Image (cartoon, rainbow, N blue to C red):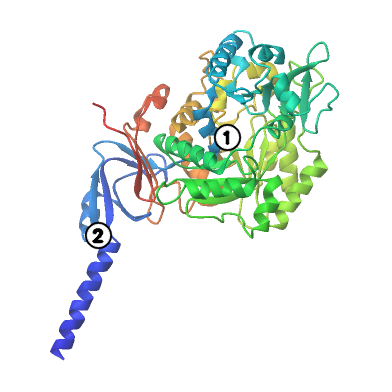
Amino acid sequence: MIFLREIGNLLRETYSEAERKINMGILWFGGQIYTLETNGSAVEAVFTEGDTIKAVGTYEFLYHACYKQIEKEINLKGKTILPGFIDSHMHIIGHGEKLLRLDLSQMKSAAQVKEALQNRMSNLSEGEWLIGEGWNENQWDDPTIIHKDELDEISTDNPVVLTRVCRHAIIVNSKAMKMANISNQSPDPQGGIIVRDEKGDLSGYLLDTAQELVKQAMPSVSQNYLEQVIKIAVDDLLSKGLVGGHSEDLNYYGGFHKTFHAFTNSIHDKRKFKAHLLVHHEVMGDMVGDNLGYLDGTAYVELGAVKIFADGALGGRTAWLRDDYADDAGNKGVAIHDTEKLEAIVQEARVHGLPIAVHAIGDHAANEVVSIIKKYPLENNARDRIIHGQILNQHTLDMLSDLPVVVDIQPSFVTSDFPWVIDRVGEERLALSYPWKTLLKSNIQCAGGSDAPIEEVNPLLGIQAAVTRKSSLDGEVYNPEEKLSIFEAVRLYTVGSAYAIGQETQRGIIAEGFKADFTILEEDIFQTDPEKINEITVAMTVVDGDIAYKKEPSH
């Protein structure tokens, strides 16, 4: 009996030691740790095991309560921990391509753009596509759109495609149009415009769905290319403090299966990042056909709502407005789908229990979408989204306040769209333009994103834009009554982004049982001059308890 008792004790000790090793964790302390549960709520220390926050409290309490499980202590040395930033609306592959391609987003004139194209052309072989990203005529000295004839002067042998910053317009040369079979007799597609010049000839300027005519003629990309672009993008996102992002890529780059597999092959436990992929309505059938549904996927790549485009963008005057554009009489913008088609897409999503995430920039577009959501409500706990919602009206706001719909906003649009957007929408619509504070006061849930590569992906820039509402073009503050507090702005990128996908009980705050996802900053964002928030340095990005990015020490 004594021998058996000794064996039993030994086995229990061995099991306890093995269990202790499995459950070893990290004690984080020595800095400001904001939980974001309420404004100013903070703790001294956090204890994590694996991917989960096990306890929060004072350092002394956690050290003594968890000392048997503490494998490592990380002294923050005055740094600030926040719940991990999540970008609620972006295009991960597009961001990676922007890092690789010719970036036109900072250029101040058409002449600069053409010079950059000429320089890039010298490195291309005959027939190779020249692709530029991010031009924005509103920041040029002369905002005249480049004509295809100007691109033909650069090359008639290489197709040229220049994507506008909003991604709702491209400029192409004659070679690209020929390859796309676009001629003077080509009709405008539904939801798009083939722009003609004053002579009635093709200008090379294609809006919204008209872009697809050229994009379909472009060569397909390889699986290896997609995976490399995703890895480049994710590494950059992690360096910006982002632990995850909601992205829309699956209808492009070769379709649903190719793109989804590129994501799952690139993001995993060796490169941790939480990618939530919206599913364009044109590939909804591919997802359903694979017996996949909302939030299915892997630990780091999950499927999201059905993405639908209701209208275009303000830059090209294709956002769908209730009344005419103030600077273009007779033009109310473009409806990508008529109401009957839009309803049919929503009904199909509902058959499969899927939420929708609808791009709606103009007030007419937003009103149409919200009316359809009201007509066809979800019967589960998932949440629909209005993406952008830049121009709203009171009727739409009233409907939204009674519906479980999240408005997915991009604060940086304020900095890049003002003051030129005033010419588009006019003074009367200005009161409910980019109305972030009004949305929150109306108890409408909001999430924060960048729409990268359209805007810079840095979430600190978005937070600063929400707090200051200062234009990057003229330095003026627009609609100051719509400014958010730093606390409200940070919650857009944490609590808001988690709430949008029904994960607010797992992510978005620092509390027991939540995921161990942290953004660690060198400075305290709540004690920083709002004008300098974008200057804060990201020290570390932690995903599921692992340090996925760490700033190299300066020498």
Image vertical order of residue 383 relative to residue 114, above or below: below
Residue 466, position as x, y percentages in the image: 51, 29
Answer few, some or many: residues within 10 Å of disc 1's Cα (few below 14, many 20 plus, some between 14 and 19). many
> Mark 2 = which residue?
69
Depth check: give the residue in front, 114 or 542.
114
User: Who's the residue at 61% across and 53% down the image?
Assistant: 382
**Helix, strand or loop at mark 2:** loop
The answer to which of marks 2 and 1 sits earlier in the sequence is 2
Q: Nearer the viewer, residue 118 or 463?
A: 118
- Closer-to-camera residue (130/374): 130
140 relative to 24 in the view: left or right: right
Toward the front, the furthest residue is 126
Q: Quadrant of residue 159?
A: top right
Q: Secondary structure at mark 1?
A: strand
* Circle 2 residues within 10 Å: few <14, some 14–19, many ≥20: many
The amino acid beneath tag 2 is Gln
In the rendered image, the residue lying farthest to the bottom is 1
> Is any part of residue 492 visible from this angle?
no
Q: On the picture, is 511 further left or further right than 263?
A: left
Depth order, front residue of 125/299: 125
Measured as percent of width and height from the top left, residue 392 is found at 68, 31
* Amino acid, disc 1: Ile
Which of the 4 image quarters holds residue 133? Answer: top right
Residue 226 position within the rendered picture, expressed as x and y whole percent measured from the top left: 54, 40
The residue that appears at 36% across and 27% down in the rendered structure is 528
Asked if residue 553 can be seen in this view, the reply is yes
The residue at which mark 1 appears reads as: 409
Mark on residue 87?
none
Mark pair 2, 1: CA separation: 41 Å
Among the 4 quarters of the image, the one containing residue 9: bottom left
